[in-house]
Image: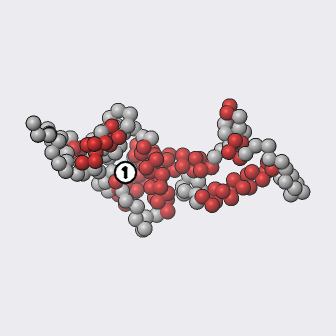
């Protein structure tokens, strides 16, 4: 279930409660002494922990795998999701709707953190946002040129749209050249 749906915070806390009780209670339901905090026990072994999986991170990683496959592979389920939800938009510009499936909403909840850590190959440029996706260098252009990003009119334009003519297809709210 963790690979299909984003688990609610309360469910994750309850599961961690049961997992921690395994270490801190004995058979007679008497409490054992806590020699380490749960966060420390969840750290990797080489950092002094027991290597217990953080379920919140694991859940996000499993959902991210679906996003990666949706953006990089072709198949029947990818085509179905693209035709139903994305259509001609980019993954980053899709706005969540109340009628979306629970699975799709789960993917959208982790989409922004996934896209921030992603690097894009341009291909035809129709699925890569010019300002908000990392496609040139090591961070998005909106962070490299925040002054320009603040005054650009169409922040969601794709690379294909911006590079569609010999002059860059970018429109700003005011002129970039000052008076002499």
Residue at the limit of the structure toward the front, as seen here: 180
**Residue at the spot of label 1:** 92
Q: Residue 52's image quarter?
A: top right
Q: Is residue 88 left or right of residue 24?
A: left
Q: Nearer the viewer, residue 24 or 143?
A: 143
Q: Is residue 39 left or right of residue 23?
A: left
Residue drawn 62% across and 49% down?
Answer: 55
On screen, residue 120 above or below 26: above
Classify mark 1: helix, strand or loop.
helix
Q: Is residue 130 visible?
A: no
Residue 180 in the image: x percent, y percent?
9, 36
Q: Nearer the viewer, residue 152 or 8?
A: 152
Residue drawn 46% across and 60% down?
Answer: 105
Q: Is residue 60 left or right of residue 14?
A: left
Quarter of the N terminus within the rendering: bottom right
Q: Nearer the viewer, residue 173 or 41?
A: 173
Residue 14 in the image: x percent, y percent?
68, 59
Residue 82 in the image: x percent, y percent?
37, 55
Residue drawn 79% across and 43% down?
Answer: 35
Q: Residue 100's image quarter?
A: bottom left
Residue at the limit of the structure toward the right, as seen here: 28
Residue at the limit of the structure toward the bottom, as seen here: 99
């Amino acid at each position: 279930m963790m690979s299909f749906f984003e688990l609610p915070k309360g469910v994750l806390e309850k599961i961690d409660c049961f997992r921690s009780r395994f270490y801190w209670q004995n058979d007679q339901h008497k409490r054992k002494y806590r020699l380490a905090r749960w966060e420390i026990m969840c750290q990797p072994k080489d950092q002094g922990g027991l290597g217990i999986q953080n379920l919140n991170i694991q859940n996000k990683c499993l959902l991210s795998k679906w996003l990666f496959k949706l953006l990089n592979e072709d198949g029947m389920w990818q085509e179905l999701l693209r035709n139903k939800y994305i259509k001609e938009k980019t993954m980053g510009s899709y706005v969540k709707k109340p009628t979306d499936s629970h699975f799709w909403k789960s993917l959208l909840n982790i989409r922004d953190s996934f896209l921030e850590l992603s690097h894009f190959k341009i291909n035809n440029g129709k699925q890569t946002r010019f300002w908000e996706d990392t496609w040139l260098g090591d961070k998005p252009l909106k962070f490299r040129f925040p002054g320009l990003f603040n005054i650009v009119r169409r922040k969601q334009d794709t690379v294909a749209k911006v590079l569609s003519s010999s002059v860059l297809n970018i429109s700003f709210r005011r002129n970039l050249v000052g008076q002499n």
